Image: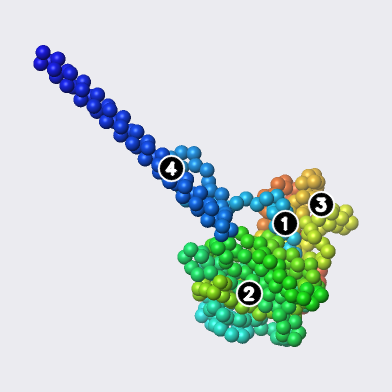
Amino acid sequence: MIVALVAMVTTMNAQGWVNALKRGVEKAAQRTVEQRVEREVERRVDDAIDVATGQKKIRKSKTTDSDEAEDEDAEVEEGPQDTEAQYEQSDFVPGAAAFFEDDLVSEQMGEFPSKWDLIEGSADVANMKGKKCIHFEPGTRIEPLMTNQQSYIPDVFTLEFDFWMNDPKTELSNCYELEFLDGEGSDVYEIRIGESYSKLEVTCRFISTTGDWRDSGGGKTWELKKNDWSHFAMSFNKRALKIYINNKRVINIPNCKSAVRMKIHQAEWGGFNGNKNYMTAFRYAKGAMELYDQKVTDMSAVEKAIAETGKFVTNNILFETGKATLKPESMTEIQKVADYMKKNPSARFEVQGHTDNQGSDAINDPLSQQRAEAVVKALEGLGCDPFNMRAVGKGSHEPVADNKTDEGRAKNRRVEFIKK
């Protein structure tokens, strides 16, 4: 009887334990559901706020609890529409003959940059993320130090430089303003580059060729390269003004009054600004894309040149100064050659690198070889057969223009594709 009683008690205890476990599982499941509901509500509230402030994101989908814990706050940028991608296609062509360049490599840290003139404020040479650059205090204005300070910009030119953008979550915002003036010292167009709600925004106010002030509007906005360098480029041809950020065209103005000088203003954006404002790698150059040419990468140009002369010569494949590192904008021209090579898979080419005569042969000869090899490597990366290409460095031994002038040296710095 005692044995039966013990068995009955044991059975009751076991049943109670099972019931308790069941209740615990149910409560845990309920908590999990409640937590997921709370997260979904928070996500939808965040999305509503993002929509209201123009900062809409697409969040990563989650498939498992572990994914949820790891990627709960992860976000990805909203993908561009097809029309947007077409709009952003780069057609930038750097001017061939530089009349002002400054990478600040030879400048002394902490000093005012020697190739510039101070209008107001304070600026000095600094180093940011491995680049020597100009550091601006808020409100500073500078301009290039030229022989004729009042008029040095031609009616066809390009301008390029790199600029630093802060992370607005940890630093105050940036704003860079380019003020272009006419011969009387009056503004004719103003370009502003700055941070707005964690987006990079570019705008332009300008006087049209009819004489009235106009506005490009809100410009193009996209996610910031936070705490990093970005690249600015612009092309002006008599009246056509185009602006590019990181190799994407963001503003296209068909009729704008021309300017003769420019000031860089470290402006305030939204009434506040920090001290991390930097610019570097400046290049002014004569020449720009043809006024009515809307597409630089016209493959018929390669076909025509090769059919008529047996080679294609270009000055639009650019490298970092003294290096064999291709600049991003060079890929537009390289893609043009790649399209031809893939259309003609049996054609073989000698890819020749040429330099001007600045520097010794001991430097220029291997540099030209390395640059030719960099072009071949880029073409191979675009799907061209490396068997059909041979890199050859020519140094400065085969000039096509006078090396005594800037224009001549610019023409001599070239890449030639010789059909064999």
Mark closer to the chain start, 2 or 1: 1
Task: From the image, tell me which residue sits under label 3.
Answer: 420
Look at the image and tell me in which quarter the N terminus lies. Answer: top left
Mark closer to the chain start, 4 or 1: 4
Report helix, strand or loop for mark 2.
strand
Occupied quadrant, residue 218: bottom right
Occupied quadrant, residue 10: top left
The amino acid sitting under disc 3 is Lys
Mark closer to the chain start, 4 or 3: 4
Task: From the image, tell me which residue sits under label 1.
Answer: 87
For the point 52% across and 74% down, the residue is: 272
Taking 119 as reference, is 155 left or right?
A: right
Q: Furthest-right residue in view? A: 308
- The answer, for residue 398, to whether it is visible in the render is no
Q: Position of residue 12 (x, y in %)?
A: 21, 22
Mark 1 or 3, closer to the camera: 1
Q: Position of residue 221 (x, y in %)?
A: 63, 61
Task: From the image, tell me which residue sits under label 2.
Answer: 177
The amino acid sitting under disc 1 is Tyr
Q: Depth check: give the residue in front, 248 or 131.
A: 248
Report the Cα–Cα distance between label 2 and label 3: 50 Å
Q: Depth check: give the residue in front, 230 or 88.
A: 88
For the point 66% across and 68% down, the residue is: 203
Task: From the image, tell me which residue sits under label 4.
Answer: 36
The amino acid sitting under disc 2 is Glu
